[in-house]
Structures are given as C-alpha cells and as structure tokens.
Image: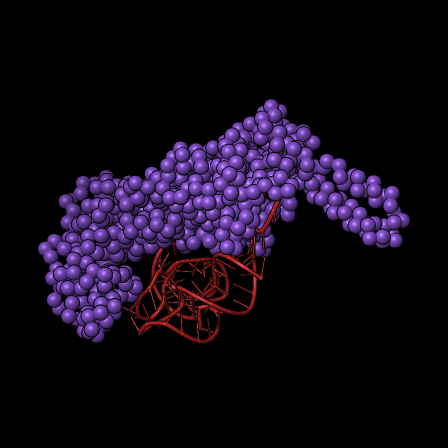
RNA sequence: GCGGGCGUAGCUCAGUGGAUAGAGCAACGGUCUUCUAAACCGUCGGUCGGGCGUUCGAGUCGCCCCGCCCGCGCCA
C-alpha cells in the first residue's frame, strides 16, 4: 500500500540518490512540530562521509535538488545542517481527500502484514469468577492489537485461553462439595462461586498454619525441648491431625479427578463454564470484543502426557525423587520450574506448552502474541525457552505484549478479601450512568433511546480509552474520575469532534451544493487537518509494529484537536464561496471517516450525535 | 541475592540518536444573538531521579548508584 506520505518520502529519497547521496547515508526523519517542514534529512553522517561541513552539504543539496513533475515535494530548503522538505499542499490535499473518499472504512489499512499469520492470546478470564478491572486490560489491549494487526494486513486468530482447569478449578469443585452449589443465576451466581472459593481458600490457609505449627512442635520435641516433652501426647495428636488429608489435598484430588474424567466433576465443570461464558459474553459485546476461539486450558488435557514424555525423552526435563518433572538450567539466570506435580497432576506450564504445540500444528502461525500482565513475564520466558528447547516453535516469533498492574486509589493490590475489588460490569454501568447525565443535560432534545445509546458508546469509550491511551507497561492506580473522564484527552472529546463533523454534513445534505474546489483549502487549520489525515496510515504501521494501540489513540487525539481548530477558524456552511463550502464539507466528511476508522481500531464507537 | 519494569511540569502521560522537551488534568483569567461550550483562547508551571561515559549531537544508547513496583518449583 502506498499512501501519499509514502510517495512523498520516496520522492525525497529519489532526489537525494540522484544528487549523489549514497543510499546507506540517507536517513529521513519527521521534524519537530515547531519546524516548518514535513520531512527532513539530517546531513551529519553523509557530510562526514563526503568530507564536507553539514550546513554546506545541506545548502548544496538544496540548491541542486531536482523535483520531478507531479511530485508531492513542494519546497526544499536548507536549515543549518538539515535539509527540510515541505509538502506540495495542493497535491497533498487532492491525494489525501481522494484516498479517504475512495477507501472509506479501510482508509489507513495496509497490506504490509500480508503473509503473516498471528495467533493472539488475550482476555483469558477464569471460570467461575467475575471479570474485574484487571481483566479489562488484557481484553481491551488484546482486541485492539488484533484490530490493528488485521488493519496492517496480517491474518489474525484470536484465542481466549480460559482458565478452566488445574488445581484452582479443583478448589472450586472441592468448595462446592463442601458448601453446596450456588442457586443464583447470572452474575450473582459467579459472585456466589467466588464467595465459596474465598471461604475454601481460607480453610486451606488454616490447614497450612496447622501443619506449620505441628512441624514446629515436632522439631522442638526432637530437640528435647522441656515444654515439648511435657506436651508429648498433645503434640502427637496435633501431628496426626496435620497429617490427615486436608482441604488443599482435596482441591488437588478434585483437579486430578477432573483431569481423569470423573463424571461428577465434569458435570459441575461444564455448568460453571456455560455460566461464565454467558455472563462474560454480555461484557464482551459491550466492549466490542470478539474472540475467534475459546479453547481454554481444558482442551489440551489429552495432549499433556505426550508433552511431558517428549520433554523427558529429549533430556530437557527430568523426574526428581518425589516424582515431579523438573526443567532446569535452560538459560543462564532462568529459574528452575516444573512441568508436572509430584502427584501426577499437570500445571499451567504443561498446558501452555501443549497450547503452543497445538497452535503450531493447527494454525501454522508465523507469530504467537500473548497479551498478559508483567507479573507473568517469568512464566512466559520459561515457556518460550522450553518450547525452543523441545523444538516446538523454532521458527515462530513468540511475543509478550505486557501491561502493568491495576492498584486501588491507595496503591494497594485489588483483592476480593480486602474488599477493594472493582468488577467490570459495575464499572461499565457507572461509566454509562455518568455519560447519560451529561447527555441528558446537553442533548436533552434527543429521544431517550438514542440518549441511552450515546451514553453507552461514550461511557464505555471513556473506559476503553483510559486503558489504551498510554504505554501499557505502567501500573495503573485506579482513579474513577480519570477513568470516566469525559473531557480533555479522552474518547468523548474525540467522539464529540466526530459528532460535530457529522452534524455539519447532515445539515449540508439538506441543501444542494456546488462542485468542490479543493484548491481553495489553503487556510493553515485546513492544511493541519489534511496533514493529520495523511498520517493515519503511518500510525497504523507503527502501532502494528510496536503492538501499541496508544499510537492510534494519540493520532485520534491530535486529529480531533486539529479539527477543533478548523471548526474555530473555518466556517463550513457559511463559507465565502460555494466551491469552498463544498471543499470544506468534503474535508470535514473525510475527517469524520478517518477518525471513525481510528476509533474502531480501539473498539470505540463514534455516535452520529452527541 | 538474581531477573524484569518504571522514574519527564503539582497530578496523569507522549517524546524509539537530531533542531527551542510537548499534551491533558488541576489552578487562575477570558469566550455562547454566529455550523454542538462534552468546546475554544490565554497565564502559571521543567536540575528529563543522580553521576560517569559513547557520539558532531543524549530525555532517548552503555555502565554505576538512588527510589518505587513486580517476579523467582508442586497456584494461574
């Protein structure tokens, strides 16, 4: 795909080559915004190689630069050691408006990623739990990365690696066996499951404390401690009690029974999966999230034995005295980890290895991208090292798109037990409610159903944008006002600008228009918007290469700001000339289109009215 | 201890070797008889955590410190 700025850069490169600058010394950069140029060639390196002073070289190149016919280069001038290039504004305007109008919803999209097949692993909520603010990160960042990679031309397969297996699920079954199955429906049922899980975890913790205490006394007894000797009988009873199968053992036992197909365990397991998916789907729809597959950890159970055997056979892992399968010293400074528990049960790691093997066989990806939190970094490093060592994914790029942790307003980790957990559904409802209050105030004339629709797009857009507008590696401290902000650098600001454009276009449609004369678009505010539109394709490429939705968010925000200057400076419907009015109308329509495309990559909808 | 991340305006953040380091929020002051005031304009605000180095050029790269966060075998 060759967009206008690509041709501009190509023309500059050709001109420099023709002037005798060797290709390897040509470096074209975007100047700082305060420099009155669109692209620049810093001559330092070339000047040194050619044995002249940089300003002299810049001047010589500027004097002799040949601009071909039809070129997008408007002006070339030396500024000290820099050779600055400005766009031919009339040609740029014509080209960009043509591109946006012609491509519509695919303006900004590319074919540079063609040939890539990328599996993106994201969202991955746990079964029998509600999604909370922590999950929104993987879900939203993941979906946006998927959208961006698709726009880049890659074939993308999204997979929701549900947490539906392992000892954690064994604990849920054990808890249900202990307390009985919740009778509630929907989200309330998930909350009830969480409650059981939390209570059961407390029992496990209590058992562990008991075991520790028994161990302490046993040791004191061994050492001939006087008090211990006196309480000998009590201690042996304590030790015996601690040695009994406890709640943790039961959780592990249930995870094993589940793995081995126990009908009772499987039936309960299936019910909770169905329940969780039903509840989560509603949230996904609100967030504009669609994930192609949801195989889940359980799907890989039949492949695990072979994975373990192969790791053992290849000498990458060994079985220790207790029966656990250990992976050791794959790389310097890479901590040892397990592939199988000593009781024969499998682990997160085991299933992740099988998952890679399956994806490679089934989907033949060129890349697998994990959208996972920073705390999982070590796990992924171990996983990647292991599959390389076993030879499962030798020529496949394995990528960790990482993001920081969400903390509460005091910097404390979110936890159900602390009572500071923020769940996704109430968060979205709150965002909707706040947006609705503003809609009612400023768009009271619209009918209530449309007000609801706008509030949903705006409120949820605000929440999504809050998660996508910055580099995701930073930790986030929860701040409701910022998360639900409806002004400043926020989705509602951008949506509002789009709505203004559409309002103008709507009003204009009522009256007949003249033929547009886009050569009249010469106001600086008009040109600023046109240049912004020209930059979308580059933003898409950069975002795709960096897995960075915030690059798109930044483009949207800058474009919206440029638009607001246009709105201030250049009346559209009351333009001085009918031909100018039509030209501005075309520009405004193109801007709304490009912004809508950008927001779509972020899973944010742009309402017609606000 | 080892490994990873972060440190830029009061707060939240851009800035991926180039020119005078930029936004938003907050604060203060202005702008609705004129295409939507969820907006716009202005003011205030910086030893880029500290040091040394590499380079024609460092917020950006390397090394050493300081501070905060995270992770490091039978959870996921």
Task: Tell me where residue A79 appears, x and y as whole percent.
Answer: 22, 70
Task: Tell me where residue A82 appears, x and y as whole percent.
Answer: 23, 68
Residue A284 in view: no
Nearer to me, A10 or A141: A10
Nearer to me, A594 or A10: A10
In the rendered image, the vertical position of residue A457 relative to residue A298, given as above or below: below
- Does residue A492 appear to the left or right of A180 in the view shown? left
Nearer to me, A286 or A566: A286
Quadrant of the image occupied by residue A507:
top left
Name the residue rendered at 41%, 52% in the picture. A469
What is the residue that sits farthest to the top in this orientation?
A263
In the rendered picture, chain B carries what hue?
Answer: red
Looking at the rendered structure, the number of numbered marks drawn on it comes to 0
In the rendered picture, chain A carries what hue?
Answer: purple
Name the residue rendered at 24%, 41% in the picture. A103
- Does residue A446 appear to the left or right of A593 in the view shown? right
Q: Quadrant of the C terminus of chain A?
A: top left
- Does residue B9 appear to the left or right of A71 in the view shown? right
What is the residue that sits farthest to the left in this orientation?
A69
Name the residue rendered at 64%, 42% in the picture. A321
Q: Quadrant of the N terminus of chain A?
A: top left
Nearer to me, A132 or A511: A132
Residue A305 in view: yes
Task: Tell me where residue A540 appears, x and y as whole percent.
Answer: 32, 48
Coloring basis for residues: by chain
Task: Tell me where residue A276 appears, x and y as whole percent.
Answer: 54, 32
- Does residue A589 appear to the left or right of A64 in the view shown? right
Name the residue rendered at 46%, 42% in the picture. A390
């Amino acid at each position: 795909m060759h967009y206008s700025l690509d041709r501009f850069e190509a023309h500059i490169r050709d001109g420099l080559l023709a002037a005798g600058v060797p290709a390897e010394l040509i470096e074209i950069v975007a100047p700082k915004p305060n420099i009155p140029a669109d692209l620049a060639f810093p001559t330092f390196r070339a000047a040194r190689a050619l044995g002249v002073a940089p300003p002299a070289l810049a001047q010589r190149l500027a004097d002799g630069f040949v601009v071909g016919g039809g070129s997008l280069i408007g002006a070339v001038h030396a500024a000290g050691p820099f050779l600055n290039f400005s766009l031919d504004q009339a040609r740029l305007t014509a080209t960009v408006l043509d591109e946006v109008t012609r491509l519509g919803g695919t303006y900004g999209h590319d074919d540079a990623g063609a040939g890539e097949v990328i599996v993106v692993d994201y969202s991955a909520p746990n079964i029998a739990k509600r999604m909370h603010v922590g999950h929104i990160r993987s879900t939203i960042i993941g979906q946006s990365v998927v959208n961006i990679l698709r726009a880049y031309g890659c074939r993308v397969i999204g997979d929701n690696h549900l947490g539906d297996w392992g000892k954690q699920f064994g604990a849920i079954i054990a808890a249900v066996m202990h307390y009985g199955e919740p009778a509630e429906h929907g989200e309330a049922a998930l909350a009830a499951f969480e409650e059981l899980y939390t209570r059961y975890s407390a029992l496990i913790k209590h058992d562990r404390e008991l075991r520790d205490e028994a161990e302490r006394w046993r040791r004191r007894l061994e050492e001939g401690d006087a008090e211990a000797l006196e309480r000998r009988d009590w201690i042996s009873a304590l030790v015996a009690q601690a040695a009994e199968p406890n709640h943790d053992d039961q959780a592990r036992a249930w995870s094993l029974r589940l793995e081995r197909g126990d009908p009772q365990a499987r039936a309960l397991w299936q019910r909770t999966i169905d329940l969780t998916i039903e509840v989560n789907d509603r949230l996904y729809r609100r967030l504009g999230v669609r994930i192609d597959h949801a195989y889940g950890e359980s799907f890989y159970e039949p492949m695990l034995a072979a994975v373990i055997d192969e790791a053992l056979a290849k000498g990458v892992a060994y079985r220790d005295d207790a029966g656990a399968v250990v992976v050791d010293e794959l790389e310097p400074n890479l901590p040892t980890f397990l592939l199988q528990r000593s009781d024969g049960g499998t682990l997160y790691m085991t299933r992740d290895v099988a998952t890679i093997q399956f994806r490679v066989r089934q989907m033949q990806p060129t890349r697998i991208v994990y959208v996972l939190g920073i705390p999982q970094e070590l796990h992924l490093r171990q996983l990647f090292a292991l599959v390389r060592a076993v030879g499962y994914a030798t020529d496949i790029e394995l990528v960790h798109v990482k993001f920081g942790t969400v903390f509460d307003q005091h910097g404390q980790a979110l936890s159900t037990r602390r009572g500071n957990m923020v769940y996704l559904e109430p968060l979205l409802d709150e965002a909707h409610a706040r947006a609705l209050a503003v809609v009612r105030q400023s768009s009271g004339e619209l009918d209530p159903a449309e007000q609801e629709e706008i509030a949903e797009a705006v409120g949820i857009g605000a929440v999504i944008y809050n998660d996508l507008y910055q580099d995701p590696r930073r930790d986030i401290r929860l701040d409701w006002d910022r998360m639900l902000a409806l002004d400043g650098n926020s989705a509602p600001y951008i949506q509002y600008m789009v709505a203004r454009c559409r309002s103008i276009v709507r009003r204009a449609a009522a009256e007949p228009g003249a033929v547009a004369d886009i050569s009249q678009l010469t106001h600086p505010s008009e040109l600023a918007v046109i240049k912004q539109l020209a930059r979308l394709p580059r933003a898409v490429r950069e975002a795709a290469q960096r897995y960075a939705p915030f690059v798109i968010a930044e483009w949207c925000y800058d474009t919206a700001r440029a638009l607001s200057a246009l709105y201030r400076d250049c009346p559209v419907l009351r333009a001085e000339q009918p031909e100018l009015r039509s030209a501005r109308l075309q520009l405004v329509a193109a801007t709304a289109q490009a912004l809508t495309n950008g927001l779509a990559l972020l899973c944010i909808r742009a309402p017609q009215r606000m």
